[in-house]
Image: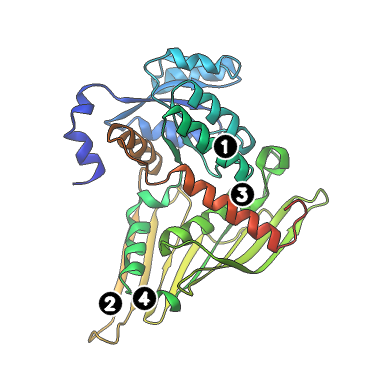
Amino acid sequence: MGLLDRFRSSKAVSEGKFGFAVVGLGHIAKPFLEELRGSLTCRVSAVVSGDAAKASAMAKKYGADTTYSYADFDRIADNPAIDAVYLALPVSLHREYTERAAAAGKHVLCEKPMASTSGDAEAMIAACRKAGVRLGIAYRCPHTMPHKHLRELIQTGAFGPLSSLRIETGFGFELKPGWRDQGTLAGGGSLWDVGIYPLNAARFLLAEEPIAVEDASATCDANGMEREVSWTSVFPSGARAICSSSYERDIPDTLKVTGEFGSALMAPAFRWQEPYRIRGEVHNPASERPMEIKVRELDFPEFRLEAEELAAAVREDRDTITPGEDGLADLREMERIYRAANIPGF
């Protein structure tokens, strides 16, 4: 039984939808708001913004009952219609609002990267644990069939032993002025914003934690902010993930898996605005003929599935499939990549 089918048959559906307060109404919040319109189990109960007019308009558009400013955010504690918050804020604000949400007794779905530093991530995990609330990180790959299918192929040895695997992936674009080019708000450079996708995808697909970083190099601007970085993550099995991210150029949004028995290309691999597709072929020596790998172009309501997963974890009293510890693991690895690339401050 799938996640949505399980919800349809659960008593929880008849008792009311799981309510989210959406904190921050910028670019990434829009698909979350749009997709929750189609959820049978979750809804937008409130919106939080520093712009009262914008908050009012968005609340009306998406059916939210209440609006809050950042100054009166803590009043969410008194609103039983809010079960959790979705944090769509600049990275530097994630710790503060996670801790405030936890203190208000609300669960948290936090956009990636989880925090500016691994120390902040540890504090966020501790705050949620102390308050007895769930903390999930908004990673999309674990919710989409193409990514899960590719992981299953890898784990079942379709490409050959893990030790023979090579993952090549990247993500980049030309950055426009905004909070992302301000280190105090963004936490880091392109690695924090888009490089985290290749990094997290490699960890997800291989179901291993990297043990070393090789061939790391970076380009920084005059203020010391990283604008482009490349590295190779080495995994215990011997698999390698060759990754890159950039704020200087458009790196094709692709993910290629190559092993002893064949290869597959996923393109696009990370952009939620475009349908996913996979093409490839493998030939296990034990089989008579090659196996074609083909996943047609598919759209997935990834943001809705993230919300519904947190709701399911709360109702079933379990950890989410992308807990705070997952975000912490990425941050520790990103810091290691920066150190390997000799970026000041790391």
N-term-proximal mark, 3 vs 4: 4
Looking at the picture, which amino acid does disc 2 mark? Answer: Met
Q: Residues within 10 Å of mark 2 (few under 14, many from 20)?
A: some
Vertical position of residue 157 compared to residue 305: above or below: below
Using the numbered discs, state the Cα–Cα distance from disc 2 to disc 4 in whole angstroms.
Answer: 10 Å
Which secondary structure, mark 1? Answer: helix
N-term-proximal mark, 4 vs 1: 1
Which secondary structure, mark 2? Answer: strand
Using the numbered discs, state the Cα–Cα distance from disc 2 to disc 1 in whole angstroms.
Answer: 47 Å
In this orientation, does residue 153 appear? yes
Residue 300: give x, y in percent of width and height. Answer: 35, 47
Looking at the picture, which amino acid does disc 4 mark? Answer: Phe
Which secondary structure, mark 4? Answer: loop
Residue located beneath label 2 in the image:
291
N-term-proximal mark, 1 vs 3: 1
Q: Which mark is residue 192?
A: 3
Residue located beneath label 1 in the image:
123
Q: Mark 4 or mark 1, which is nearer to you?
A: 1
N-term-proximal mark, 3 vs 2: 3
Left-right relation of 106 to 233:
left
Residue located beneath label 4 in the image:
159
Q: In the figure, residue 207 lies in which quadrant?
A: bottom left
Which secondary structure, mark 3? Answer: helix
Looking at the picture, which amino acid does disc 3 mark? Answer: Trp
Q: Residue at x 48, y 73 (%)?
A: 239
Using the numbered discs, state the Cα–Cα distance from disc 4 to disc 1 in whole angstroms.
Answer: 39 Å
Q: Residues within 10 Å of mark 3 (few under 14, many from 20)?
A: many
Q: Mark 1 or mark 3, which is nearer to you?
A: 1
Q: Mark 3 or mark 2, which is nearer to you?
A: 3
